[in-house]
Image (cartoon, grey):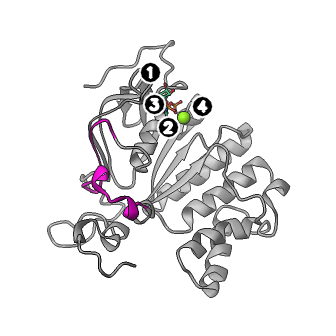
Amino acid sequence: MNSTQNNIDSGPEALAEMEPYMNDSGATSSHSDVSDMPMIHFDEVSKLFATGKPALENINLSILPGEFVSLVGASGAGKSTLLKLIYAEEIPTSGIVSFNGRDLSKINRKHLPYYRRNIGTVFQDFKLLPQKTAFENVAYALEVFGRTPEEILDEVPQILDIVGLEEKGRSFPKQLSGGEQQRVALARALILQPKMIIADEPTGNLDPVSAGGIIDLLLEINSLGTTVILATHNQTLVDRIGRRVIALDRGRVISDEMVGRYIMPERRRPRIIA
Ligand SMILES: Nc1ncnc2c1ncn2[C@@H]1O[C@H](COP(=O)(O)OP(=O)(O)O)[C@@H](O)[C@H]1O
Ligand SMILES: [Mg+2]
């Protein structure tokens, strides 16, 4: 860690320790006492790439700690772009994206890894290292952050157990089913105990049963207090989740229902929320 760091506000310690807001008595908000201070806030956010129409246009939304949010919309609607803004992989063309009140565009590049420790990511294509076993794929995330071999031997089996892969630690990705590979990816995302999981079409390559298993795991992780943002175009899955659904259409939020079902635009035009 850089001890000569003088910009305290954006220093690694501050970024790695973005704790939940404190209430008036100084106590940290718990999951059951959901704070109304957002974890994620989009304020008039637009994102234009060099080519084409805006990927996102005037997005205003807040996500509270502990929420499970499904982000739905057709291919090209802007789901991945929205997640990339949260992960600070992209910065907005205009507007502000903040995490626990911190403007992400102001985080110094070299401090981004510290910010990103708050977030676990899962993708459609799993992104596992093919030459490493399931155990090693999960352990790798811990090694990068300097955990000792003892800590790794203690923590990895616990996480593999949570995702139902206690017997598969020695298997290589190609020896695992798609659903099992995605569970390894989820274990890797969870190993650093992130405050939030962002999952971009995590079930896109899976059969319906495996997909349902991944969603159940995300719900379970959420019930333990981790905020979850799930981007998907799978209507059946979103209907089953029955939590908050934000629908995007060509870069705009066309509906945001606290307990919603994903209604396809062609079947019913969703209510426009200002
Ligand atoms: N790096 C990029 N450069 C140019 N255009 C992009 C880039 N990333 C995304 N887009 C465009 O932005 C729009 C939204 O894309 P995306 O966020 O990937 O949608 P979704 O995840 O909902 O399918 C699309 O029109 C896409 O082509
Ligand atoms: Mg996408």
| Residue receiving disc 1 | 52
Residue 100 in magenta stretch:
yes
**Type of residue at label 1?**
Gly
Which numbered mark, 1 or 4, is in the foreground of this view?
1
- Magenta part of the protein: which range? 92-112
Which label's residue is closer to the chain start, 1 or 4?
1
| Residue receiving disc 4 | 234
**Type of residue at label 2?**
Ser
**Type of residue at label 3?**
Gly
From the Cβ of disc 2, is ligand 2 less than 8 Å away?
yes
Q: Where is residue 2 shown, x and y percent of the image?
A: 36, 78
Q: Where is residue 143 shown, x and y percent of the image?
A: 60, 75
Mark 3 vs mark 2, CA separation in Å: 6 Å
From the Cβ of disc 3, is ligand 1 less than 8 Å away?
yes
Mark 1 vs mark 4, CA separation in Å: 26 Å
- For the residues labelled 3 and 2, say whether their Cβ atoms are less than 8 Å apart: yes
Which label's residue is closer to the chain start, 2 or 4?
2
